[in-house]
Amino acid sequence: MSLSTGKGRLVLVLMMAVCIVAGCGTPPPCNVDSAQVEQARGEYEAAKVKSDSQAAEVEALEARLATISVDVVSDAELAEMKQRLEELKKGSGR
């Protein structure tokens, strides 16, 4: 029994050694046309420019939103202002 177990372990160790030594091998060469590479680079650059401009636009819109939201009057303030306007109109004789 111990002989077959020893042989099994030896075979396992040898198989592992072969796998480690063999590895994955060298990768196959990349057969891509240089025109395709340049086209991909151009598309990347165009997308990057578009992304940068959209990011700038987002920042500008967020700043605009911040200034507009400061100018917005709440409903309670609007009602108070209308009431004050009516009081002023009555006082001026209109």
Image (spheres, rainbow, N blue to C red):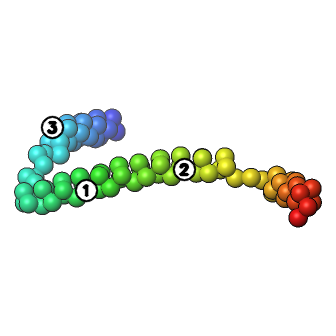
Question: Which of these two is toward me, 32 or 19?
Answer: 32
Of labels 1 and 2, the one closer to you: 2
Q: Which mark is residue 21?
A: 3
- Local packing at callout 1 (Cα closer than 10 Å; few below 14, some 14-19, many 20+) is few
Q: Earlier in the sequence, mark 2 or mark 3?
A: 3
Residue 13, image x and y in percent? Answer: 24, 36
Which structural element holds mark 2? helix
Mark 1 → mark 3, Cα distance in angstroms: 45 Å
Which structural element holds mark 3? helix
Q: Which mark is residue 64?
A: 2
Q: Is residue 60 left or right of residue 69?
A: left
Under mark 3, the amino acid is: Val
Task: Look at 83% across and 54% down and name the residue there.
Answer: 81
Q: Is residue 86 visible?
A: no
Task: Look at 10% across and 54% down and name the residue there.
Answer: 30
Question: Which of these two is toward me, 19 or 63?
Answer: 63
Q: Can you tell which quarter of the image residue 84 is in? A: bottom right
Q: Earlier in the sequence, mark 1 or mark 3?
A: 3
Q: Earlier in the sequence, mark 1 or mark 2?
A: 1
- Local packing at callout 3 (Cα closer than 10 Å; few below 14, some 14-19, many 20+) is few
Q: Which mark is residue 46?
A: 1
Q: Is residue 48 left or right of residue 29?
A: right
